[in-house]
């Protein structure tokens, strides 16, 4: 059996661009999913019953659907229902954001709940509004506690972006598969893909470990 | 009431807080059973009595952390507001100190004290910082301004918490068992700060088990039992000549010898 690793080097431009897309998807998804998750979590905790139920419904729906199904659904079904078709990248981003927002909302909700009631009461006793209590007192403390969880969600997300390859978003997985299909260099391209994901993912995972040590809660 | 009862020293001063038949229930449990009590400007009123007798609940009703199920509370002549905005304005004029300190752990001592003026009063950070620094100096913790709560002893944390409440320049200070969570050796420093505050003329409502403090500092003492005030009067009466047997029982259980 002969291997031809030069195929990887020949396509370095495409692979580099695709890696950039993978990072872009990860960063953009988190940039959307973190603030949206705060809002969803706050709605679940403080809003009137119907709004709270809607927020809960959203979280439970997207937390319990396979991400790949959401990706397909956003790509094929949403245009039929709404008549609006977004480009693949935007569709993939939307699907990832819907999914990760639901997860992050649960993380934020748990974090907010973990801050004992006396903290809110002390802030209320000063005359703060509910929103001020959340923004100034509860969220900063909750964020410190959930940072390790958000960081591991980030690492998972970095790998899960590969799922949007099924709707032809030109990220790392899609580009590798395309090159594989054109060159028939299956083993080389799959190995290259694994090496790239691992080399990029490992430092991020190590960073998460460091964050978990650094932000261990002391009270 | 007998003619020998000592008069209420501050009764001529305006009434800051007036409780009228306050009732509070938690489910089936009636925690406050019709509490009536006046707090005059400049007075230190101590609420004493066994645990679970409703003292802390009354304090928490005072600034709206708990809602009433009956009766009324007047603060400076007006009924406690029920709307969010009104409650906030009223809370800003009442300071509260908690048994468990409840300092904000993500903020330094000086940031804790400056938080109210900054967020609630909209004070500029520099001005709020100056006010906070002065108050930390007042409670003897100028050198701990940059420390986080986790690095402070219990007594130091509670003094910062007192400074945090004072930073709003309140008309009344509510103390909810401020020394109950402290080591014996640090209780004195907190009581010292409270005594100094009383001497300055601050109006204070203090839930406490520190009978010596109540005897020495209070102008008026209310004895709670099972959601009622069973006896109230000046400390000389309560501690030296209680008229109600239950008060005597309670004090003797605490080892109070008069």
Image: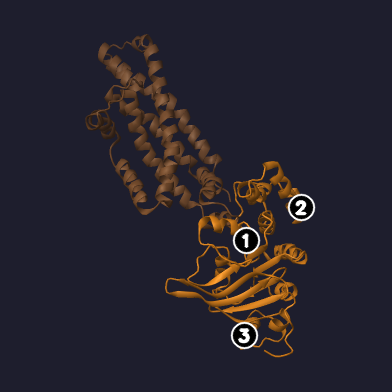
> Of marks 1 and 2, which one's residue comes earlier in the chain?
1
Q: Quadrant of residue A78?
A: top left
What residue appears at the point 28 percent right and 34 percent down from the top-left corner? A70
B233 relative to B22 in the view: left or right: right
Q: Chain of mark 3?
A: B
B98 in relation to B6, above or below: above
Left or right: residue A59 compared with residue B45: left
Residue A187: x and y in percent read 29, 18
Q: Is residue A37 visible?
A: yes
Q: Secondary structure at mark 3?
A: helix
Q: Which chain is brown?
A: A
User: In the rendering, what colour is chain B?
Assistant: orange
Q: Residue furthest bottom?
A: B2
Q: Is A166 situated above or below A7?
A: below
**Badges 2 and 3, same chain:** yes
- The residue tagged 2 is B137
Name which of mark 2 and mark 3 comes first in the sequence: 2
Q: Nearer the viewer, mark 3 or mark 1?
A: 1
In the picture, the disc for residue B249 is 3
User: Which label's residue is closer to the chain start, 3 or 1?
Assistant: 1
Which of the chains bears the disc numbered 2?
Answer: B
Q: Is residue B1 above or below residue A106?
A: below
How far apart are the two marked residues, 1 and 2, measured between alpha carbons? Answer: 19 Å
Callout 1: SS: strand
Q: Kindly give the residue lying farthest to the front in the view shown.
A: B77
Give the distance between the C-alpha atoms of the residues marked 2 and 3, in whole angstroms: 41 Å
Secondary structure under the numbered disc 2 in the rendered image = helix
| Chain of the residue on which disc 1 is drawn | B
Identified at 53% across, 40% down, the residue is A213
């Amino acid at each position: 059996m002969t291997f031809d690793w030069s195929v990887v080097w020949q396509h370095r431009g495409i692979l580099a661009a695709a890696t950039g897309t993978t990072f872009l998807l990860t960063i953009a998804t988190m940039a959307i999913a973190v603030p949206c998750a705060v809002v969803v979590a706050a709605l679940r905790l403080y809003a009137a019953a119907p709004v709270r139920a809607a927020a809960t419904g959203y979280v439970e729906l997207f937390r319990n659907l396979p991400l790949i199904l959401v990706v397909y659904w956003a790509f094929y079904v949403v245009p039929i229902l709404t008549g609006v078709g977004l480009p693949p990248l935007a569709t993939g981003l939307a699907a990832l954001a819907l999914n990760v927002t639901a997860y992050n909302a649960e993380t934020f909700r748990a974090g907010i709940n973990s801050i004992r009631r006396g903290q809110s009461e002390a802030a209320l006793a000063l005359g703060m509004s509910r929103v001020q209590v959340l923004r100034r007192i509860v969220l900063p403390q909750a964020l410190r506690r959930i940072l390790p969880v958000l960081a591991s969600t980030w690492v998972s997300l970095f790998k899960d972006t590969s799922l949007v390859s099924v709707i032809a978003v030109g990220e790392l997985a899609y580009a590798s598969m395309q090159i594989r299909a054109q060159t028939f260099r299956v083993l080389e391209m799959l190995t290259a893909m694994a090496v790239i994901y691992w080399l990029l993912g490992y430092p991020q995972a190590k960073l998460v470990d460091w964050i978990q040590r650094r932000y261990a809660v002391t009270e | 009431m007998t003619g020998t009862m000592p008069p209420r020293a501050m009764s001529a001063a305006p009434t800051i807080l007036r409780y009228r038949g306050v009732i509070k229930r938690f489910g089936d449990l009636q925690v406050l059973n019709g509490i009536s009590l006046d707090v005059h400007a400049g007075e230190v009123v101590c609420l004493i009595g066994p645990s679970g007798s409703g003292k802390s609940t009354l304090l928490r009703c005072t600034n709206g952390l708990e809602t009433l199920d009956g009766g009324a509370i007047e603060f400076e002549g007006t009924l406690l507001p029920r709307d969010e905005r009104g409650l906030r304005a009223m809370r800003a004029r009442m300071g509260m100190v908690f048994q468990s300190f409840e300092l904000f752990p993500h903020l330094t001592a000086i940031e804790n004290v400056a938080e109210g003026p900054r967020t609630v009063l909209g004070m500029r950070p520099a001005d709020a910082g100056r006010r906070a620094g002065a108050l930390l100096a007042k409670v003897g913790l100028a050198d701990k301004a940059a420390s986080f709560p986790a690095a402070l002893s219990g007594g130091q944390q509670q003094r910062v918490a007192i400074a945090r409440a004072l930073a709003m320049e309140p008309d009344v200070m509510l103390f909810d068992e401020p020394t109950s969570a402290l080591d014996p050796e640090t209780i004195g420093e907190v009581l010292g700060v409270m005594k100094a505050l009383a001497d300055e003329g601050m109006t204070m409502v203090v839930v406490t088990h520190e009978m010596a403090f109540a005897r020495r500092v209070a102008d008026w003492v209310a004895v709670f039992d099972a959601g009622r005030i069973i006896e109230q009067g000046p400390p000389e009466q309560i501690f030296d000549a209680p008229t109600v047997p239950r008060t005597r029982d309670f004090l003797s259980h605490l080892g109070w010898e008069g």
